[in-house]
Image (cartoon, rainbow, N blue to C red):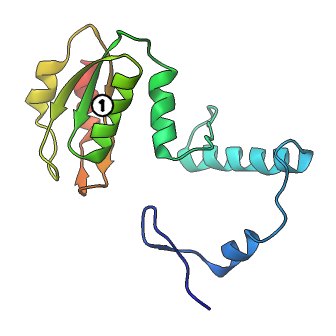
Amino acid sequence: MIKQYLLSPGPTPIPNEVALAMSETMIHHRTPQFNKVFEEARQGLKTLFGTSSDVLILASSGTGAMEAAVANLFSPGDKVLVLTAGKFGERWTALAKAFGCAVETVTAPYGQTFLPDDVQAKLRADIRCVYVQATESSTGARHDVAAIARLVRS
């Protein structure tokens, strides 16, 4: 048997029981059986994330979630700040521009992170949002999201 790998992100081995489960008959998404499985997943995610708030499950890639975070929260002309140091930061910039946001950026070279002073210099009262990812998996850079959040809150 040829070993299968999921390559996003990865390689990630797929356990045999998962591969076998994927060969079973699909459950239609408008049945009580699906609703039960979906609700179990939502409750499990609440436990995983340590929250009692609703958890949204999106049927998309991470880019779909990023798009939802722009399209559903901001309007054309809203000013947003994007911290970019790799492909995902570039994706935040492209998405915000595609939805008509006025985009400011703080950039760092691939593989590096942002200087707090550079972020602070771009923060103004009219900035409605700061987009940043915790890790830039395209380069391996890890950003100090807690420090960035402190700057934004102040």
Residue placed most toward the observer, 128 or 2: 2
**Residue 98 image offset from top left, x and y in percent:** 39, 24
Badge 1: residue crowd in 10 Å (few <14, some 14–19, many ≥20): many
Q: To which residue does mark 1 refer?
A: 93
Question: Could you say which quadrant of the image residue 91 lies in?
Answer: top left
Vertical comparison of 61 with 3: above or below: above
Vertical comparison of 125 with 141: above or below: above
**Residue 85 image offset from top left, x and y in percent:** 20, 43
Residue placed most toward the observer, 144 or 6: 6
Left-right relation of 134 to 122: right
**Residue 125 image offset from top left, x and y in percent:** 25, 8
Instruction: Kindly identify the residue that appears in the image at 25 percent across and 57 percent down.
Output: 140
Q: Residue furthest bottom?
A: 1
Amino acid bearing label 1 = Thr
Q: Quadrant of the C terminus?
A: top left
Instruction: Kindly identify the residue that appears in the image at 68 percent across and 74 percent down.
Output: 19
Q: Secondary structure at mark 1?
A: helix
Q: Quadrant of the N terminus?
A: bottom right
Instruction: Kindly identify the residue that appears in the image at 51 percent across and 39 percent down.
Output: 64
